[in-house]
Amino acid sequence: MRAIQITEFGGPEVLRVADLPEPEAGKGQVRIAVTAAGVNYADTHRTDDSYLAPGHLPFVPGAEVAGTDPDGRRVVAFVTSGGYAEVAVASESLTFPVPDYLDDGAALALLLQGATAWHILRTSAHVAAGESVVVHAAAGGVGSLAVQLARHWGAGRVIATASSDEKRRLASELGADATVDVTGDDLKGALEAANGGRKVDVVLEMAGGTVFDASLAALAPFGRLVTYGMASRDAPKPLASGQLLSRSRGVIGFWLAHCMARPQMLRAALDDLFALAHHGHLRAVIGGTYALGDAAQAHADLRARRTTGKLLLDPTI
């Protein structure tokens, strides 16, 4: 089968097409003929070995696929690795049927990134009606869904940040009340100004570095900052307990991998996400579909912040 195999850690250039044996499904696993593979920012961390979990060479990247099972049923699935390929193997407990009203791209957008947006808002931040919510990278895969979910669940003010006019326009179209240029000199001040001069209640943060620092400084008493990524690749700074105690603030980390050990958490999120999409309350933004052999270009575009929404690989081309 054709697959992308990484034999050395590095940038996008290490993603190369290889001819590999098809994986075999063991007990409790499902063999999936892949029709689309999701590309996520976390994949770029796996490629250069800066991910939370250390990598082991060689490997086929990709954490999610859409396709058909041996009985011809359409499914989406989380995979430990191996998504960038014509055939993948997934745990039965992490494989979910795709309803007829969703195409593969939308189903994938709602899988990993949708479940992340759902859980950081519901499980980690416990967003309440009327609260202000800041969504960083609001035009991205997680952010574009988080903006819509926060709006649908009654957030008092949704503030979206992005790096370009085009991305900020998209965030507004998706329901953001205000947008902020994340590259500006005074991000803390811009976030507070976008909230009418008040500090904010909830921040969804995935960059780290100066974005994390400014977001924490803009947080109101009893506010919560959920950190779920390290896109800046800046080394995290120590966080003293006094920084939280003095302002009654909370910082919560979220990694979707922990939900995979509790499949019922994923099932609950997907049931809700699929229903919201079916009733027109949630729109999956597909930012681009790349041929399997163009995986390196997909990673380069993602790292350069040239993309919006969900990126897909098509192993059939």
Image: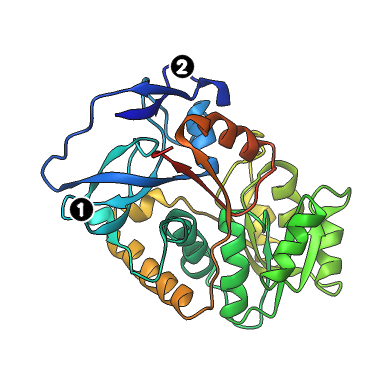
* Label placed on residue 213: none
Residue 143 is situated, as x and y percent measured from the top left of the image, at 61, 59
Which residue is situated farthest in the front direction here?
317
User: For numbered disc 1, what is the local secondary structure?
Assistant: helix
* Mark 2 and mark 1: Cα distance apart in space: 30 Å
Quadrant in the rendering for residue 55: top left
Q: Using the image as rendered, state which of residue 281 and residue 317 is in the foreground.
A: 317
Residue at 23% of width from left, 59% of height from top? 73
The residue positioned 28% from the left and 60% from the top of the image is 96
Residue 96 vs residue 233, the one in the foreground: 96
In the picture shown, does residue 168 fall above or below 172? Answer: above
**Residue beneath disc 1:** 92
Tell me the quadrant of the picture where the C terminus can be found. Answer: top left
Seen from the viewer's position, the closer of residues 261 and 282 is: 282
Q: Is residue 135 visible?
A: yes
Q: Amino acid at mark 2?
A: Glu
Task: Rate crowding at label 2 as few (under 14), some (14 to 19) or many (20 or more) other CA atoms within 10 Å.
Answer: some
Residue 202 position (above or below residue 76):
below
Name the residue at the right extreme: 185
In percent of width and height, residue 312 lies at 49, 46
Three-letter code, disc 1 = Glu
Evaluate if marks 2 and 1 touch, with contact meaning CB atoms under 8 Å apart: no
Instruction: Report the number of discs.
Output: 2
Residue at (70% x, 43% y) in the render? 306
Q: Residue drawn at (82%, 66%), measured in percent from left and top?
A: 192
State the SS at label 2. loop
Residue receiving disc 2? 8
